[in-house]
Amino acid sequence: MEKDIYVAGSKNHVFLNKLIDSPNIKVGDYTFYHDFVDPTRFESLNAGYFVKGEKVKLTIGKYCSLADGIQFISSLANHPIDGFSGYPFPWVLGEETGYEYVYPDKGDTLVGNDVWIGAKATILPGVTIGDGAVIGAGAMVTKDVPPYTVVGGNPARLIRVRFPDGVVDQLLQLRWWDWPVEMVIRHSRAIAHGDMDELVAAAKEL
C-alpha cells in the first residue's frame, strides 16, 4: 500500500478515493474513513453491495469524516415483500423455479460534502445526505437528510439544524470544499470557527 493513503500517518485512517476500485463507488478528495482494525477494507465490508456490478451507485463528496463500522446498503440487499415471501427462491433453489427475482431498486445513494457520519451508522438505499450534515452514531438513515442538519436514532430523526437558514444558504453558495486545497488550508481556521466574513472575502479571490 502506498503511504499516502493514510491520513497524517495514522494506520486507522485512510483517504478513500485512493483505495476505491469499484466503478459503482465514487469518493471525493480528502474524505477519510476510520477503522480500529483495518480501514483499507471499506470497499468490501462497509459498501460491499455496491461492488457487485449492479447499476446503482454510491457517491460520497469531499472532506467527509466517516467513522468506524458504518454501513452503506444498496438495492441489491433489498428483498421484495409485496408477495407472501421475500425469499430469493430462484437464486437459492435454481432457475427451475420459473420466474425472475427482481430486487426493489431504490436508486443511487448520495452523500454530500463535509458530512460527518458517526460510528456504526447505517445508510439505507437511495438516501441523499446533504452537505454539512451530521449523522449520529448508530443512526439508521432511512430517508433524505437536509444540508447542515443533525440526525440520530433508529429510524434517524431530526435533532437540530446547525445554522440559521441564511447561513446555510451562504455556505451552500460558497462551496468552500471546491476551493483549491491551498486556499482551504489558508482559511481552515475561519471554516472551522465559523468566520463567515473571512470566507465571503476569501471567495472573492476566486
Image (cartoon, grey):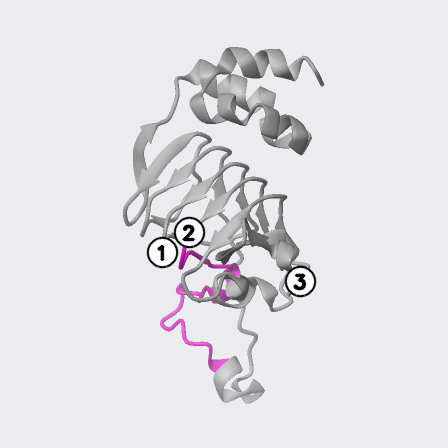
Q: CB atoms at circles 1 and 3 under 8 Å apart?
A: no
The range drawn in magenta is 67-90
Q: Dot 3: what SS?
A: loop
* Residue where numbered disc 2 is placed: 67
Tag in front: 2 or 3:
2
Q: Is residue 145 above or below residue 92?
A: above
Query: Does residue 57 appear in this view?
Result: no
**Left/right of residue 21 with respect to residue 64 in the rendered view:** right
Q: Which residue is mark 1?
A: 120
Identify the secondary structure beneath mark 1: loop
Q: What residue type is disc 2 on?
A: Ala
Name the spot of residue 192 as percent of width and height, x first. 46, 27
112 with respect to 166 (left or right): right
Q: Residue at 67% of width from left, 30% of height from top?
A: 182
Query: What is the x, y in percent for residue 165?
Result: 43, 17
Count the numbered circles shown.
3
Residue 19 at x, y percent in the picture: 63, 59
**Which amino acid is tagged 1?**
Lys
Query: Which one is nearer the viewer's eye here, 152 or 98?
Result: 152
Which quarter of the rendered picture does the N terminus lie within?
A: bottom right
How far, Cα to Cα, is label 1 from label 3? Answer: 23 Å
Q: Secondary structure at mark 2?
A: loop
Name the residue type under label 3: Asp
- Pair 2/1: label in front: 2
Q: Earlier in the sequence, mark 2 or mark 1?
A: 2
User: Marks 1 and 2: in contact by CB < 8 Å?
Assistant: yes
- The residue to which callout 3 is attached is 21
